[in-house]
Image: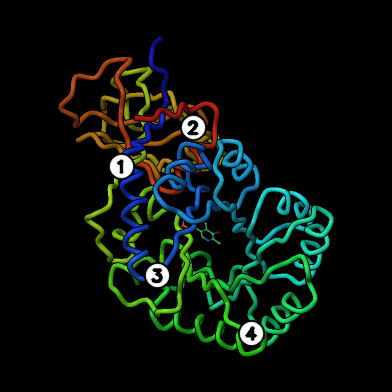
Amino acid sequence: MTERYPRVEVNLEHLRHNIRTVVEKCGAFGIDIAGVIKGATGLPEVAKAYDQEGAKWIASSRLEQIEDAINAGIKKPMMMIRVPMLSEVSEVIRLCDYSLNSEEVVLEALNEEAGKQGKIHNVIIMADMGDLREGFWDKDEMARVCKRVEDEMENLHLSGIGTNLGCYGSINPTPAKEQELVDVAEKIEAVIGRKLEIISGGATTSLPRIWEGNMPPRINMLRVGEGIILARDLELFYGCPQPELMKDNFRLKAEVIEVKDKPSHPVGEIAVDAFGHKPTYVDRGIRKRALLGIGKVDYADFGEIFPLEEGVEILGASSDHTILDIEDSPREWKVGDIVEFEIDYASVVFLTNTRNVHIVYK
Ligand SMILES: *Cc1c(COP(=O)(O)O)cnc(C)c1O
């Protein structure tokens, strides 16, 4: 059979290495890992790798992905990490052992549904520590709701509290921020009269606390996706080098469908492009260019895919085509050639989410 393109090649061995490394490093600080699979659209092979290499929970923001993980035979507890919609409460109870929560009305619905399904569902209550996405802002209200779960919601178990940082508000999970979360936990423990089992200190962006050895002691769970799947962002954006992690777990390969010399400035009256935008075009004279059989529908934004080949530059894209300038490339280009790209979180989530892109494991 001929190899099909475009494709995303997944290096499972390198992915496994990253999971093992992060699980071990966090384990040394008493921190368990929830393996977040949404960054790779919940590919069952990725979920299985997390399972086999020591993640304690399998976590996603999407119930469909959690169901796929269960169907792949994974027995680990499943965790819903987007605060549930009221309309998905029955599925959350059916599929998940844990969920992150921030609304009393949803907790009431979860409690009632867990009763109906004869289950005890574990909840982690989210504190907003300044990133301004999900979670209680008012920590007195949070403590009151925790107390209600503890005393009145008999089909829920209050496992602990958590926070999410570095997503909307770009807030850095500094040691002081993590300590603030521990302080909130201790305030809630005083109200409910017992220790919480889980203090979930964040996601990938909290990993520098482990690498730098300055995580407050009571944080005992992190929910990690990008920092394992791609391990790209901390080095690029947080100045936290992680030489022990593999960076080539996901690669995109696309096929050349046309090679021609063409003017670099469009010829005729300029109107709008395929998406109604008015881009500017630089006139660099006649240049050699290649057209690829992949486009915005597959990866969304060509600024999020990075050609690994010297002298290759992305000029633009439409729904199904990507246009490369190859004038400065030393290679003799021909139709059928394959171009390889590094991809980031944004492009991986799109590329793994479409049936037009083949996923190949190696
Ligand atoms: C997506 C998400 C994570 C994982 O984020 P990464 O940056 O991929 O590690 C953790 N927690 C919550 C609540 C999330 O939504």
**Front disc: 4 or 1:** 1
Identify the amino acid type marked 1: His
- Would you name the residue on which mark 1 appears? 14
- Would you name the residue on which mark 2 appears? 318
Q: Quadrant of the C terminus?
A: top left
For the residues labelled 4 and 1, the Cα–Cα distance comes to 41 Å
Element at label 2: loop
Element at label 4: helix
Task: Tell me if mark 1 has few (under 14), some (14-19) or many (20+) residues whose alpha carbon lies within 10 angstroms of its own.
Answer: many
Task: Tell me if mark 4 has few (under 14), some (14-19) or many (20+) residues whose alpha carbon lies within 10 angstroms of its own.
Answer: some
Question: Does residue 37 appear in the picture of this structure?
Answer: yes
Residue shown at 62% from the left, 48% from the top: 62
CB of mark 2 within 8 Å of CB of mark 4?
A: no
- Residue 22, numbered circle: none
Q: Quadrant of the N terminus?
A: top left
The mark nearer the N terminus, 3 or 4, is: 3
- Residue 139, numbered circle: 4
Residue shown at 61% from the left, 83% from the top: 194
Residue shown at 44% from the left, 63% from the top: 32
- Residue 30, numbered circle: 3
**Is residue 252 or residue 182 the one in the foreground?**
182
When the figure is inspected, residue 235 is found, relative to residue 195, above or below; the finding is above
For the residues labelled 3 and 4, the Cα–Cα distance comes to 26 Å
The mark nearer the N terminus, 4 or 1, is: 1
Question: Does residue 314 appear in the picture of this structure?
Answer: no
Task: Tell me if mark 2 has few (under 14), some (14-19) or many (20+) residues whose alpha carbon lies within 10 angstroms of its own.
Answer: some
Q: Position of residue 282 (x, y in %)?
A: 33, 40
Task: Tell me if mark 3 has few (under 14), some (14-19) or many (20+) residues whose alpha carbon lies within 10 angstroms of its own.
Answer: few
For the residues labelled 1 and 2, the Cα–Cα distance comes to 33 Å
Ligand 1 within 8 Å, label 4 CB? no
Ligand 1 within 8 Å, label 3 CB? no
Q: Position of residue 206 (x, y in %)?
A: 41, 68
